[in-house]
């Protein structure tokens, strides 16, 4: 692929809310190509501020993509333009990935007001907050009133990704493990709403009780600690869930919680980009020093960093 | 920062044919060679495939057909991409395709046709070449 991309053309297409322009802009960010700074500076801050960013996470196979597809349909029925960023893991061996979230959302593929982008985590050092955050803003800037970030909730970097969101849904299903699983550190600690999908399957009620107990122990006893049950494949429970999402989003906006979260997300993204940029420099230094390997690794790292800071 | 651009491709099955073992095999082989592969599943229309390819900003669309409808469906995807001002996204076709149909498909803008028995390295190479624009 040619590296000489026409930034002006992409910015122009972006302003027209053109799907190709949006897609090209996200690639520019993902591949960290020249001109990306100019592009990001051209985004519309008013649209970004008005956008609701929803994070959806949970174990594999609980129906996140199907639920996301249903949420998209409901937001569309309200006349809202919706963006979806579906993050899947990259293979640690080949660096490749299979991005299959579209399969469950193809009903929206011809709708010009639904933008869906699959992203691979690409094994980046600071997670992919930097590129995912930029993709959220590109979609928001192009008029998306809602952007959903969907990711498999298995590791730290996924927890980081959903922290880019204004509020986060954790989706699980009956049979995904008992309350001890649910007590393990991680995603449950950052979830604002908990959804038991596949609620027609046996064990849904006990799964809901387990989750409710976990929420109570977290000590946030408010009306949002109720566990939601959905059957995404039949569209059941979706309207109630969207109602709760909107109530919670409004309350966060009013209380200043949303502002606080956006600031935190901003810092996280800055850190992510900085680590990514530093990585290139450090890797080059390591390559340059490779002839002399006897020094202690920690000492060498210290030396490299001192060198970099002196050069600044 | 990566100075190499990641190869992104889309694998799709147009039409009513529901046999996707081949398409999934290709998707896995491409993943194992470092490609990011968007898979859209079975029974897609040419317009859906073109719209997905644009939103995902892939360089190449790989189509699989085992039903015999390739003469109609593969050129329809090329046409849908052209209409959407995305003629630079290349199309590769694979599946059960008689030899005499291959020149017809190539004339219609399909870059490469890969038939059963093609070694996997050759398939990867075809996608790599198509990613080089």
Image (tube, rainbow, N blue to C red):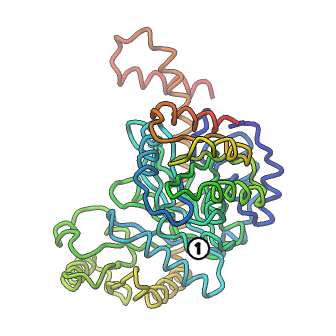
Q: Residue furthest front?
A: B100
Query: Mark 1 belongs to which subunit?
Result: A
The residue closer to the viewer here, A62 or B107, is: B107
Could you say which quadrant of the image residue B71 lies in? Answer: bottom right
Residue B62, image x and y in percent? 57, 48
Q: Residue at x 36, y 83 (%)?
A: A231
Q: Residue at x 51, y 58 (%)?
A: B67
The residue closer to the viewer here, B11 or A14, is: B11
Q: Residue at x 64, y 76 (%)?
A: A145
Residue B120, image x and y in percent? 45, 35
Residue A261, image x and y in percent? 51, 68
A61 displayed left or right of A164: left
Above or below, B25 relative to A105: above
Q: Residue furthest top?
A: A291
Q: Is residue A229 visible?
A: yes
Task: Give the quadrant of the N terminus of chain A.
Answer: top right
Q: Secondary structure at mark 1?
A: helix
Crowding around mark 1 (Cα neighbors within 10 Å: few <14, some 14 to 19, many 20+) is: some
Q: How many marks overall?
A: 1
Question: Which residue is the site of mark 1?
Answer: A108
Task: Give the quadrant of the C terminus of chain A.
Answer: top right
The residue closer to the viewer here, A205 or A202, is: A202
The residue closer to the viewer here, A300 or B72, is: B72
Residue A300, image x and y in percent? 41, 20
Q: Is residue A272 visible?
A: no
């Amino acid at each position: 692929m040619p590296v000489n991309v026409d930034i002006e053309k992409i910015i122009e297409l972006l302003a027209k809310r053109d799907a190709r322009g949006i897609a090209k802009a996200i690639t520019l960010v993902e591949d960290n190509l020249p001109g990306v700074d100019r592009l990001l500076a051209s985004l519309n801050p008013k649209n970004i501020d008005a956008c609701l960013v929803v994070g959806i996470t949970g174990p594999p196979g609980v129906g996140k993509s199907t639920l996301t597809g249903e949420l998209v349909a409901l937001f569309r029925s309200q006349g809202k333009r919706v963006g979806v960023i579906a993050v899947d893991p990259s293979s640690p061996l080949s660096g490749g990935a299979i991005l299959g979230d579209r399969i469950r959302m193809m009903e929206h593929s011809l709708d010009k007001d639904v933008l869906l982008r699959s992203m691979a985590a690409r094994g980046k050092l600071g997670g992919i907050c930097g590129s995912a955050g930029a993709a959220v803003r590109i979609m928001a800037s192009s008029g998306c009133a809602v952007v959903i970030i969907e990711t498999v909730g298995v590791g730290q970097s996924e927890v980081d990704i959903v922290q880019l969101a204004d509020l986060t849904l954790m989706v699980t299903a009956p049979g995904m493990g008992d309350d001890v699983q649910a007590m393990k550190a991680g995603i449950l600690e950052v979830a604002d709403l908990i959804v038991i999908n596949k609620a027609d399957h046996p064990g849904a009620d006990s799964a809901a009780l387990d989750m409710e107990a976990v929420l109570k122990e977290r000590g946030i006893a408010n009306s949002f600690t109720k566990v939601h049950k959905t059957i995404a494949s039949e569209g059941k429970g979706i309207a109630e869930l969207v109602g709760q999402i909107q109530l919670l989003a409004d309350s966060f906006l009013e209380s200043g919680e949303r502002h606080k979260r956006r600031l935190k997300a901003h810092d996280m993204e800055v850190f992510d980009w900085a680590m990514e940029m530093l990585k290139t420099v450090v890797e080059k230094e390591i390559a340059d020093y490779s002839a002399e390997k006897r020094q202690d690794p920690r000492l060498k790292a210290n030396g490299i960093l001192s060198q970099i800071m002196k050069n600044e | 920062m990566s100075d190499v651009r990641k190869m992104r491709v889309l694998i799709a099955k147009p039409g009513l044919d529901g046999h996707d073992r081949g398409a999934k095999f290709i998707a896995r082989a491409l993943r194992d060679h470092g490609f990011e592969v968007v898979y859209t599943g079975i029974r897609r229309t040419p317009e859906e495939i073109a719209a997905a390819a644009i939103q995902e900003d892939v360089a190449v669309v790989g189509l699989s057909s085992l039903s015999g409808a390739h003469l109609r469906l593969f050129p329809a995807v090329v046409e849908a991409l052209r209409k959407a001002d995305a003629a630079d996204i290349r199309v590769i076709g694979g599946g059960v395709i008689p030899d005499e149909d291959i020149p017809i498909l190539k004339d219609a803008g399909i870059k490469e046709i890969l038939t059963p028995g093609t070694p996997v390295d050759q398939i990867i190479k075809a996608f790599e070449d198509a990613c080089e624009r």
